[in-house]
Amino acid sequence: MYFAYPARFDPDDGMIAVSFRDLPDTHTAGRDLSEAHAMAVDALATTLWFRLRDGQEIPRASRPRKGEDLVPVEPAVALKVALIAAASGRRGAAARIARGLHVDHKEARRLLDPAHPSGVGRMTSALALFGRTATITVERRTAA
């Protein structure tokens, strides 16, 4: 799974409007490019949380097209989405996490709860139980 979504940053009535092709219900704006980018990161996280909470699909990020800039998902949000996706549809996923991480069942369920913040270390360890690994790439952000 790749967690950076293409977005358009368009001037609009003195603001910079942001829209996501892969998430058509996600829009935001900022007074300048820097604020618009920060707002886009926040809007993206909010949309993904609501989709997880409501049991909706998280679409795969597509490749950017001309005029689009990639907006990354915050690492903690990306890890939570990836863990829930890896565990989705698997019976006993919470029990598997509890056994594998040597934690009680309540803590394992929290790792699978989109509304509950979880530590990066716990989530990467839980991902490993489902045969997944997480990598973080740091890149220079391009101008929109």
Image (spheres, rainbow, N blue to C red):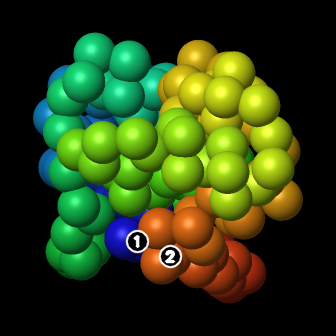
Instruction: Please tell me the numbered disc located at residue 2.
Output: 1
Residue at image position (24%, 24%) is 55
Residue count near mark 2 (Cα–Cα under 10 Å), binned few <14, some 14–19, many ≥20: few
Instruction: Please tell me the numbered disc located at residue 129.
Output: none
Does 58 sit left or right of 139 as displayed? left
User: 127 above or below 20?
Assistant: below
x, y percent for residue 117 = 73, 28
Residue at image position (48%, 78%) is 131
Residue at image position (40%, 71%) is 2
Residue at image position (28%, 16%) is 54
x, y percent for residue 96 = 54, 51
Asked where in the image residue 109 lies, by quadrant, the reply is top right
Front residue of this view, candidates 12 and 139: 139
Does 91 sit left or right of 36 as displayed? left
Number of marks in picture: 2
Q: Which residue is mark 2?
A: 132
Residue type for callout 2 = Arg
